[in-house]
Image: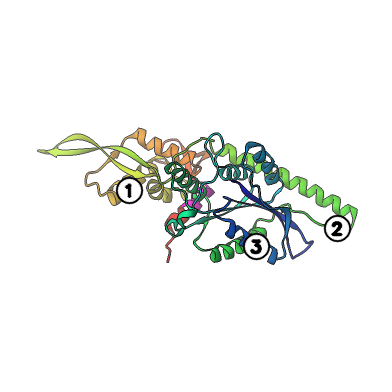
Amino acid sequence: MIESSCFHTLNGRGMQKKYQIFVSSTFRDLADERQDAIRSILDLGHIPAGMELFPAADTEQLSYIKKVIDECDYYVLIMGGRYGSLDEEGVSFTEREYDYAVETGKVVLAFVHGDASMIPVGKSDTAPRLVENLDQFRDKVMSGRLVRQWTTRENLDTMVVKSIARATQEYPAVGWIRGDAVASEDLLTQINSLRNENEALRQSLTEIKRSQTPKIDNLAPLSTQVTLRYHYNVYHGGFPTEHSSSFVATWEELFKAIAPSFLSAGSRNDVAGGIHTLAKEVKQIQATPRVFSTDVAMVENQLFALGLIKYLDHVSVAGGPGKGIVLTERGRAQLTELLAVRA
C-alpha cells in the first residue's frame, strides 16, 4: 500500500504564505503515527490540501502521485518496520516516491524508527527479502543527510512539528499567497516573475547536482563489507621477502578513516594513507601494509560514486597524483554524523 498526503501550510509572518508538504509512509503499520502528524499540522494552523490516502498501489497511481510531488514544496518520509507494497520490479512504492522527491530536488525531512526491537511483530516485515530491502532503503535514506530517529508516537509527533517549522524558516520554498493579500497587480506580477526565476534556478541547481554525481543503480550501502589486499615485507637475515594478505572493512569504516583528510583539498595518497591508518589502528595489522593501488583506486571511485567526495577542477595537490579531492556537502554531513559524540 502507498500512503501519501499533500498539505498546504500557513506561514504566520508576512503574506500568509502556504506551503504544500508531501507526507509518505507505509499504510497500515503507521496509521496512528500518520494521524498524529496530520493532527499536529492542523493544530499549528496549517491547512490540509484535501488529499488524504492513496490506498491503491499501482503504476498509474504512482504516476499521478509524482504530479502531486511536483506541486509540493517539502517532502516528509516516516519509516517504521515495513518496506511496503512492491511494484513489478520488486521496489516498494514508498521508496519510488522517496527517490522521485530526491531526484526533483525537494527538501526532504526523513524520520526513521531508531530501534527495530521496539516495533511490534505485527508491524514488522519478517520475509527475508523484505527485511533486506527495508535495510537497504534505510541505509539509502540515512546516507548523506541528517535524519531524525524516533521510537515512540510522542517523540515522532514532536520531531515532525519542529522539523517542519525549522524547514520553512531555513529553506523557504515557493509556496502560495492569497490573491487578496497582494497590494497591487504590479506587485503580483513581480512576485510571479521572481517565483518563476526561483523555480528555474532550483531546476538548474538540481541538474548541476545530478551531473556532479554519477547515477549508478544498486550502489553498495556504507554497511557493506569489502576486502582490501596489501603487500608487506618479512625480513630474514636482514633481507626482505614480500608477502600478500588482505583484510575486511565496511565502507563506513573506510570513509570514517579517509574523510578527515579531505576537509581541505587532498589527493589519492590521502586515500591510501587513510586505509593504512585503518589497517594499523582499527584492524590491528602488525606489519606495514602497502595496499594494492587498484584497491586504493576502487575505494576512491566508490566514495565518488556515493557522492561523498568530489574533484576540484584545475587544482592539483603536491605529493599526490591527479586533481585535488575534497568532501562534498553530503560527505561533510555524513562525517559529522559518524564522528558526533552521543549521550
Q: Is residue 342 above or below residue 100?
A: below
Give me the C-alpha separation between circle 3 and circle 1. Answer: 41 Å
Residue highlighted by disc 1: 278
Say which quarter of the image contains residue 128: top left
Q: Check disc 3 and give the amino acid type.
A: Ala
Magenta region's main secondary structure? helix
Give the image location of residue 20, x and y in percent.
71, 53
Q: In percent of the image, x 77 and y 54: which residue is there?
A: 176
Residue at image point 25% right, 49% down: 284
Q: Secondary structure at mark 1?
A: helix
Q: Earlier in the sequence, mark 2 or mark 3?
A: 3
Q: Are marks 3 and 1 in contact (CB under 8 Å)?
A: no
Residue found at x 46% / y 52%: 335
Question: Of the numbered discs in the image, which one, if any, rests on residue 182?
Answer: 2
Quick check: 325 left or right of 247? right
* Local secondary structure at mark 2: loop
- Residue type at mark 2 is Val
Residue 262 in the figure: left or right of residue 5: left
Where residue 178 appears, as percent x and y from the top left, is 82, 57
* Most foreground residue, 175 or 283: 175
Which circle's residue, 3 or 1, is located before the other in the chain? 3
